Amino acid sequence: MEISPIAHIFTEFSDKFGIPRQSGLAKDTIGRIVFEPEYRNPDALKGLDGFSHIWLIWEFTECHTDEFKASVRPPRLPNNSHMGVFATRSPYRPNALGLSSVEIADISPDSDEGPIIYVKGADILSGTPIYDIKPYLPYADCHIDAKGGFAENVGDYRLKVHFPDDYLSRIPEENRSAAVEVLAEDPRPSYAKNDPEKVYGLTFAGHNIKFSVNYKNLYVVDVF
């Protein structure tokens, strides 16, 4: 089967580093889904405004590999632990497909670019191709008794973000809460050693955010 994109999503993430590791973790991030010309028929979205969330099927464009990796290293597991690729959501897969559940923020049916879907909570690099969109069905998709396997035991990794006002003011106002959410999720891999002197850089909303981490505290040291 050959597939081609129906749309592309545009977010504030221009680099892989710092993208939330699952959809919905940074709920204030906004993405814009723009359809390819042949799919810009408003009839294709009829009824979608009755749903709160959708599933996106998309491509890990930065993670293609010709080598099958049976085991991978999930970023939240300590000590460089490996798990089977099909027990993880690693981007390094036999077919580089991603799956994300996102919230519909707005639907613009007749913009200059055709129908546009605005979504919240996307964990996707800007410019990523979208291959399909399906509505989220609570009665079928929500399993309240589901087990989370090893992912339930990764511990509390969220950080307290210290973002000085003079630095935060450099971020566009509509992106400030999302920037704090993204930082609180701790962009670093879990196997990174705690080094309060090490400065990391995260690109978000067109700005480079420099920060350091001292255990459970993240300190923003510059924004440009």
Image (cartoon, rainbow, N blue to C red):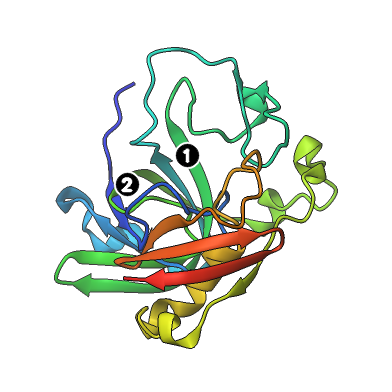
Q: Return the x and y of residue 17 as percentages of the image width and height.
A: 44, 49
Please give the residue where the numbered disc 2 appears in the rendered image: 128
Q: Return the x and y of residue 26 as percentages of the image width and height.
A: 55, 64
Is 99 in front, or is 66? 66
Task: Give the crowd class for mark 2: few <14, some 14-19, many >=20 residues within 10 Å.
Answer: some
Identify the amino acid type marked 2. Thr
Q: In this image, 86 relative to 177: left or right?
A: right
Can you name the residue that lies furthest to the right here? 145
- The relative height of residue 20 versus residue 82 in the rendered view (above or below) is below
Residue 215's tag is none
Task: Give the crowd class for mark 1: few <14, some 14-19, many >=20 residues within 10 Å.
Answer: some
> Could you say which quadrant of the image residue 84 lies in?
top right
Please give the residue where the numbered disc 1 appears in the rendered image: 98
Q: In this image, 50 relative to 149: left or right?
A: left
Assign a secondary structure to mark 2: strand
Q: Residue at x 48, y 56 (%)?
A: 199
Is 155 in front, or is 170? 170
Q: CA distance from mark 2 to mark 1?
A: 10 Å
Q: In this image, 204 relative to 94: left or right?
A: left
